[in-house]
Amino acid sequence: MGACSSSTKEPADPLVAEGKRLFDKNCTSCHSIKPNLTITGPSLYGLASRAGERMAGLDAREYLYLSITAPGDFLVEGFANLMKADFAEKLSADEINSVIAYLMTLE
């Protein structure tokens, strides 16, 4: 997944910076962080503000973890189940946590 970069400014927090690097490498060919820009998957603009409201009983971080490791468990309305389901195997727990840290900056 990673054709275009989501931003040129590097985050100061090393965990967030690593998450941005992994996001840029694995996610930007399908997900934009710009408002109303749909590629294959939904735009992630403002994700941190709404992630905690997506699934009852899950906070934002839990929802993002599930979205990365079991993407077919919850689909955003209007989108098909096209996300690769192997990120739990491809990425370490620390890498997934860094991606989540980066996604939590997308307010």
Image (tube, rainbow, N blue to C red):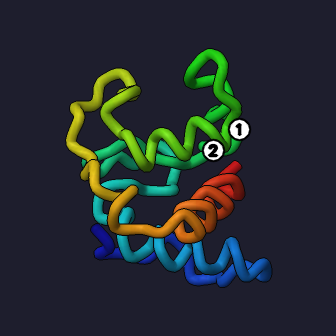
Residue name at image x 41 percent, y 47 percent: 69
In-front residue for pair 87/35: 87
Name the amino acid type tagged 1.
Ser
Q: Is residue 74 above or below residue 98?
A: above
Distance from disc 2 to disc 1, alpha carbons, whole Å, reads 6 Å
In-front residue for pair 17/32: 17
Left or right, 95 with respect to 78, comes to: right
Residue name at image x 51 percent, y 55 percent: 34
| Rendering coords of residue 22 (x, y %) | 47, 74
Q: Is residue 11 above or below residue 93?
A: below
In-front residue for pair 77/97: 97
Q: Is residue 80 above or below residue 9?
A: above
> Tag on residue 1?
none
Q: Is residue 8 above or below residue 39?
A: below
Residue 80 sits in quarter: top left
Residue 27 sits in quarter: bottom left
User: For numbered disc 2, what is the local secondary structure?
Assistant: loop
Left or right, 16 with respect to 68, comes to: right
Near mark 2 (Cα within 10 A), the count class, few <14, some 14-19 or many ≥20, is some
Residue bearing mark 2:
46
Residue bearing mark 1:
49
Left or right, 42 with respect to 10, comes to: left
Near mark 1 (Cα within 10 A), the count class, few <14, some 14-19 or many ≥20, is few
Residue name at image x 23 percent, y 34 percent: 81
| Rendering coords of residue 32 (x, y %) | 43, 56
Quarter in which the N terminus is drawn: bottom left
In-front residue for pair 5/23: 23
| Rendering coords of residue 72 (x, y %) | 31, 33
Q: Pointer 2 and pointer 1: residues touching (CB < 8 Å)?
A: yes
User: For numbered disc 1, what is the local secondary structure?
Assistant: helix
Name the amino acid type tagged 2.
Gly
